Amino acid sequence: HRFMSEGVNARNSLLTRVFGMYSVEILKEKESSDSTSSYKGKGNGGKWNGGLFIPSVKSDKQPKLINKEERVYLVMNSVFPSSATTFITERFDLKGSTVGRECSSEERMTKGANAVLKDLDLKREVENELEEYSDEGFYGDDNHLNRRRTGKKSRLKNYGIHIGSRKKAALMAQLRRDVDLLNRCGVLDYSLLVGVADMEQSIQRNKSEYDRNSNDDNQSSKVLSRLLSWIDFPLPYYGAGKTPVDGGNLSSLVGTRNGKQVAYYLGVIDFLQPWTVKKRLERDLKGLAGYDKREISCVAPGDYASRFLKFVDDHVT
């Protein structure tokens, strides 16, 4: 709360906002000789009551309470707008880990644009782009060849997730603040969720929709439709201004991807996993199984934080 109360963090933090915390009380019951699990209501008809949800169950028999369990649910903002499935063309879940962090070909085929790409998918894409650029150095002029010999990624400015140097500087500065908080809290397994919306495709679709809805004989209606289609620019879909993402100033950024103008939706998610004995054991067992303990997802919070920031810095331009 203190972290998000600071002005810069309140405006720019990429941590998903917590809107509410709700307690759900689950009562496990037993009737006669048959042991069953059910929910026992307490008079409010299964409605929310001051944050406590208690579903009602009608029964002629008097159940015997054998156990009570409480679960706490957090309500947080979504990284993507409500209509994301209609216009987001790519999704990335980035942790900085490279062990098993790739989207299967089966998922790509079955889910299409809804498939979640991961660290290795982006890493390989960037490596291929840089390799192609390096190969061109053999046939270019002396300047191209010199840039190739430097081995610096700065030679190619728009690879990976491209938002420009100023936006990247603001993004990385805020991510360092966010990740520093998570590191001090001793948590891990969080990731940067990125959605890519093709703005050119969306705007063209909006124009087509307006044209279809306009009367061919009414020229003023056509002009108005054209005007409305550009009012939303650079938002990726019509009506986005009415349903914004409530995630701070850096949660939606305009950039390019593969030469096309796009909008990026970004947010840090899944940051509630503490560094427990179980997680330490998981790391050690995976190390014994032959995995690189530095690259698996389960590492100490400090190592996780530095690796996460380095991966984002290397793949966002």
Image (spheres, helix red, strand yellow):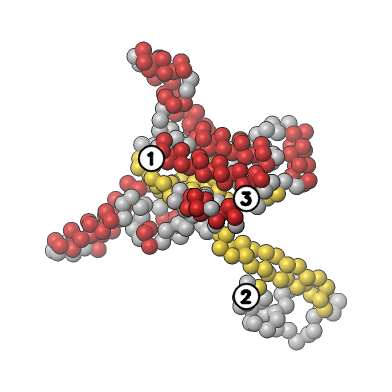
Disc 3: which residue: 271
Residue at x-position 46% and y-position 46%: 90
Image position of 54 (left or right of 127): right
Q: Nearer the viewer, mark 3 or mark 1?
A: 3
Disc assigned to residue 50: 2
Q: Quadrant of the N terminus?
A: bottom right
Spatial distance from mark 3 to mark 1, Cα to Cα? 28 Å
Q: Where is residue 280 in the image (x, y as percent from the top left)?
A: 76, 42
Disc 1: which residue: 256
Q: Quadrant of the C terminus?
A: top left
Q: Position of residue 292 (x, y in %)?
A: 69, 31
Residue 100 visible, this orientation: no
Spatial distance from mark 1 to mark 2, Cα to Cα? 45 Å
The answer to whether the residues at label 3 and label 2 have Cβ atoms under 8 Å apart is: no
What is the secondary structure assignment of the residue under circle 2?
Answer: loop
Disc 1 crowd rating (10 Å Cα; few below 14, some 14-19, many 20+) is many
